[in-house]
Image: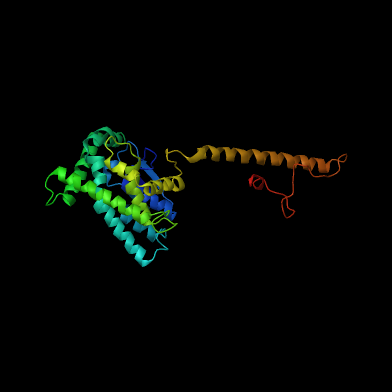
Amino acid sequence: MELSCWGGDWGLPSLHPESLTVMAYAKFSGAPLTVNTITNSWRAPKGDLPVLVSEDIVISQPAKILNFLRKQKYNADYDLSAKQGADTLAYIALLEEKLLPALLHTFWVEAENYCSVTKPWFASRIAFPLSLYLPGKMSREALNRILLTKGGPPLYSLTEVEAQIYRDAKECLNLLSKRLGTSQFFFGDTPTTLDAFVFGFLAPIYKVCFPRVQLQEHLKQLSNLCRFCDEILTCYFRLTVSGHSPAGQDTADANLQKLTQLVNKESNLIEKMDDNLRKSPQHPPRKLTTLKLAAGGEESSPMSRLSP
């Protein structure tokens, strides 16, 4: 299964909320996805991202992709009760109604954010000449979606709409913070679909460096939601708060592999020396002092010597 999505920056695996949601759910459920990020590719405008391809099946939209993964037995909600399943649907609807309009406005409508961050970032990942057209199209679509859902009476002007969507978003963040409390995830110690959606919506607000940060400032006052995002990045995407692998994990893995190869070579050399000593008539058979017996009386293998 291959997932095509927008790439990441600012310590995020993707800047795109829908892409982040699917990527997080795949991590939670153990789904083996190959992630292909859009980097200056003509594939970007062919459809709404993210897109999942499995053999001859092509699926877009996070909800449909997650349903497909569940049918493939990758279900992060397996242990949820019926009530918790209903709560999941209710909170996802709350996110889409209350938080998504402000998220779209922050990225695509707020002029300073769009011109200095959003437009240059996305344009750099789309092939010319589409890079001149597609970001503007995405901005217009975001504005139309906001006005379609929030632009009716009694809100007639864009200024009134903006004020209302940020009030709704802050209220939504407060509700999420209260619901999470001191728990690691929204339904205990195991992440579920709701955690994937909340992470996908919150992480871009939390991490992207915008000049206008009204919503980000409010989110950073809710320490449990910030901790929630940081822990998912650290535990499931192996990224720290700064966006790097924790404690040089990649380097540590490479060093461990080299150390294992070195120990194996030394072990083989020692075994050959031991055999030669056993066969030599002037040296009675004996065990080298460097070869210790493991607990239980059996000689330890090269890999067991690396164990604590």
Is residue 86 something that shows in the picture? yes
Is residue 60 something that shows in the picture? no
Residue 107's x, y, as percent?
A: 26, 40
Measuring 27% from the left and 32% from the top, which residue is drawn there?
116
Question: Image quadrant of residue 75?
Answer: bottom left
Along the viewing direction, whichever of 4 and 83 lies nearer the viewer? 83
Residue 245's x, y, as percent?
A: 47, 40
Along the viewing direction, whichever of 165 and 240 lies nearer the viewer? 165
Q: Is residue 271 left or right of residue 120?
A: right
Q: Is residue 90 above or below residue 165?
A: below
| Label tally | 0
Measuring 36% from the left and 42% from the top, which residue is drawn there?
37
Q: Is residue 239 above or below residue 61?
A: above
Coloring scheme of the render?
rainbow
Along the viewing direction, whichever of 268 and 294 lies nearer the viewer? 294
Residue lying furthest bottom: 82
Residue 119's x, y, as percent?
A: 26, 35
